[in-house]
Amino acid sequence: MASTQMSASPTIAAFAAPPLADGSLTQFFDSVGKFFDNVSEIHWLPLVIALACQGAYLTLRTRAWYSGLRAAYPAEQFPWRNIWAAEVAGNGISSVIPAHAGLFVRLYLGRHSVRGSNYATIGSSCMVELPFDALVGSVILIYGFTQGVFPKLPDLSKLNAFDLSFFAQHPRFAVFFVTLVPILLLALFAYASIRVRDFWSNVRQGVTLLRTRRLYVRGAVLPQSIAWLFRFAGLWLMLEAFNLPASVNLVLTVMAVQIAAGMIPLTPQGAGVQQALGDHSLEQALG
């Protein structure tokens, strides 16, 4: 096991490089240098197939959203490729801009893809993906915590990620932040419901698919299930591409890290948090 750790350590540094913290450019350039030092060790075929799996994952997820929109607007005709473009564009924006900014792009493009639609219905139609994603994500997170790969709460401040260290060092602010976000969302919904008479009717229209079990399973659960399998396969191949010993445990660990990091929207796609947690969790899993 010791030899495995020694051989895997440089690759771990490349796969989950320490994030930029405290304005230190030295760490960033060191991480970039380590990455390029290990480029020659990358297996390119698994990497290309992993990227194809990620593309398939995103594509299948658009089928669930498209099914939700079709159920909400059965009389309207709109091509699936427009919904696919809105989903991909939203994910791309969220990868470079924090606070899930891609969601607004997704709503805007979705609104202009369906004639006669409104933002309330388009926004709530995204919720058709939530039940199954929440179920799968919860199972994966529980697995990650039971394996002990996540750092304990007192150790969060020691991780090289501004988001985690800041919240760990200021627990009262962390509680305030976590509490404030849902309160603001509820206030926004309350304001909209007062200002717009048919707001809640539009919201209910967006989740029409959830009220029809057969259509929901076929239109949302099925493509989402296959999408999660592609995500699993993509991560497995990504680990192989970076010379890490791929296994069910390690893939589920990486998925748990991604889900946990996505809950902190201060950086794009949880960047920084994901790298810090990933570095720690991979070392624990390989340990």
Image (cartoon, rainbow, N blue to C red):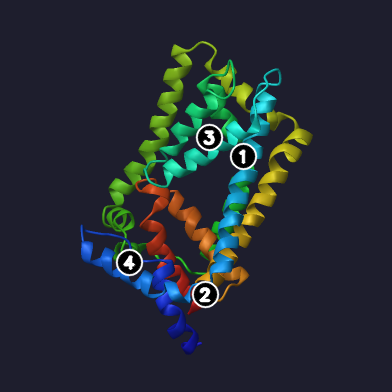
Q: Secondary structure at mark 3?
A: helix
Residue 264 in view of the camera: no
Q: Is residue 160 above or below residue 80?
A: below
**Residue where numbered disc 2 is placed:** 244
Q: How many marks?
A: 4
Q: Amino acid at mark 3?
A: Ala
Counting from the top left corner in percent of width and height, residue 82 is at 58, 31
Q: Amino acid at mark 1?
A: Thr
Helix, strand or loop under label 4? helix
Badge 1: few (under 14), some or many (20 or more) residues near its Cα, within 10 Å?
A: many
Q: Nearer the viewer, mark 3 or mark 2?
A: 3
Q: CA distance from mark 1 to mark 4?
A: 33 Å
Residue 80 pos. (x, y %): 65, 33
Q: Find the residue positioned furthest to the right.
A: 214
- Ranked by sequence position, the earlier of labels 1 and 2 is 1
Residue annotated with mark 1: 62
The amino acid type of the residue labelled 4 equals Val
Say the numbered circle drawn on residue 222: none
Question: Closer to the N terminus: mark 3 or mark 2?
Answer: 3
Q: Which mark is residue 86?
A: 3
In terms of sequence position, does the residue under pointer 3 or pointer 1 come before the other? 1
Identify the residue at image location x=48%, y=43%: 91
Name which residue lies at 65% across and 38% down: 64
Q: Disc 3 and disc 2: Cα gap in Å?
A: 34 Å
Q: Position of residue 71 (x, y in %)?
A: 69, 26
Dots 3, 4 in contact, CB < 8 A: no
Within 10 angstroms of label 3, few (less than 14), some, or many (20 or more) residues?
many
* Residue 115 relative to residue 280: left or right: right
State which tag comes first along the sequence, 4 or 2: 4
